[in-house]
Image (cartoon, helix red, strand yellow):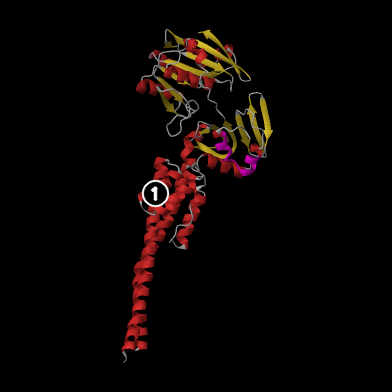
Amino acid sequence: MSAARLALAAGAFAVCAVFGAVRRAEREAGRKRLESVSADISALRVKLADGRLPLGRIASELAASGQNAGYWRGVSEAMARGLSFGEAAPPVPGLDSEADEILRSLFAGLGGGSLRAEEERIERAERGLRALLERRTRELEKRGGLINSLSLLAGLAAALLIL
Amino acid sequence: MLGSDRRIQAVLGLLPERIRRELEALPADIPAEEIRFRTGRPVQIVTAKGDLLAGSALSPGEAKALLGRLCGHSVYAREEELRLGFITLEGGLRVGVCGRPEVRGGRIAGLTEVSSFNIRLMREAVGCAEGVMPLLTEGGRPLSCLIAAPPGGGKTTLLRDIARCFSNGVGTPPRRVALADERGELAGCVGGEPSFEIGSRTDVMDLCPKAEAISMLVRSMSPELIVTDEIGGPEDAEAVAEAARCGVAVIASAHASSCEEILRRGSIERAVGSGAFSRLIMLRRSGSRLSVSSFAL
């Protein structure tokens, strides 16, 4: 068995293992992103309901609080130029289509209704995000290990084939 | 274009593009006092000498969007003001709104389906009260006075400058003045800061029902003079009478076109009867000229 073949087998195993780890890390990052956005939406509701702050100011305060700062800074700046919240808030990067849909329907008319209507709308979105977050956490627990195991197995199989 | 006033330009910037262009095409010298928008009907520009219908109609969708823009895209944050039927914008511009009220628990909670907007272009006339100051003082002390005029007669503009004169000591020693500014028109406060010149010794109770504002001001700010706009109900008259009993002078305005008319109004008649006011000042406006008559009560 040549040294080159051994090296190739080890390389194939390493690539598969890294691929699995990266996929798992991506999923974990997506879940964390969802968690932080969900926390921001809850903070938005509290500032809106208790403080009755205008949305531009809420976005600016969320930008200062650290989580997703860049995103909220962009929203705050766009609202200062006269755009509505729906116009000012682009899709949050790093979220899947389901989370994106919940946020899009929340952001679209935010700011145009009464306090009670806005609270109800945000609470509905919070419930949706919470349910999605729970699902993603469960999936990650189940599939995260599976992805790791499968990629390690695939790497092992590729290495054996090469050898 | 309807003049180059920064506040008017700011409001025009909130209008739908189509209507804004039409209004910008109007002559600059129209002395507009109000601009009224109604869904499905042309824009009405009100001046002291009459009105002018111009511009195309606002659609219901545009009216909703306009309300959003007037509220900084946060209608809920202006709910308390909307409940009273108006929004005060930066620079003290007041926008009256009309539509279908949302009633919750038997109480008006806000407005839905807004169909009319009345943008009142309040003018500041610093110095306009200096000529009437001798009528408002006796031995250097402020007198409690009732200022009456028909709607649009200049009461608010005069009251604002009266506050400034007493506060800054123009024609009288300086006094602690308090404004019970229920509709936000006297001081035009935005974020707690007055948009108009109301004097250095003036405190403002902003967007608070008049009667409560007067009681709170008497208790908390020990004013020597309270200035308030458009008293009407019995609770207002009672609050004024109570302030007078506490030794605080009150200068208030009321809608009326004659002495007889104002004294026929039950609550005001009672306030006058209780000695709350010692003088009635009637304003009459003819174009840009304002004439003043004073009566001892």
- Name the image quarter holding residue B43: top right
Rendered view: B257 above or below B114: above
Task: Residue B269: give x, y in percent of width and height.
Answer: 51, 13
Figure check: B159 above or below A32: above
Residue for point 38% across, 70% down: A23
Q: Is residue B120 above or below residue A116?
A: above
Which one is in front, B148 or B142? B142
Magenta highlight on residue B27: no
Total numbered labels placed on residues in the image: 1
The residue at 50%/27% (across/down) is B185
Which residue sits at x=42%, y=26%? B204
Mark 1 surroundings: few (<14), some (14-19) or many (≥20) residues within 10 A: many
> Residue B70: x percent and y percent?
53, 39
Q: Quadrant of the N terminus of chain B?
A: top right
Foreground residue among B16 and B238: B16
* Amino acid type at mark 1: Leu
Front residue of A73/B101: it is: A73
Residue B123 in percent (x, y) is at 55, 26
The one of B27 and B194 positioned closer to us in this rendering: B27
Q: Does residue A120 appear anywhere in the picture?
A: no
Residue beneath label 1, please?
A: A62
**Stretch of the chain drawn in magenta:** B8-21
Prevailing SS of the magenta stretch = helix
Residue B114: give x, y in percent of width and height.
Answer: 58, 39
Q: Secondary structure at mark 1?
A: helix
Q: Can see residue A109?
A: yes
Name the chain under label 1. A
- Above/below status of B204 relative to B279: below
Q: Is residue B10 magenta?
A: yes
Which residue is depicted at the point 46% across and 43% down? A116
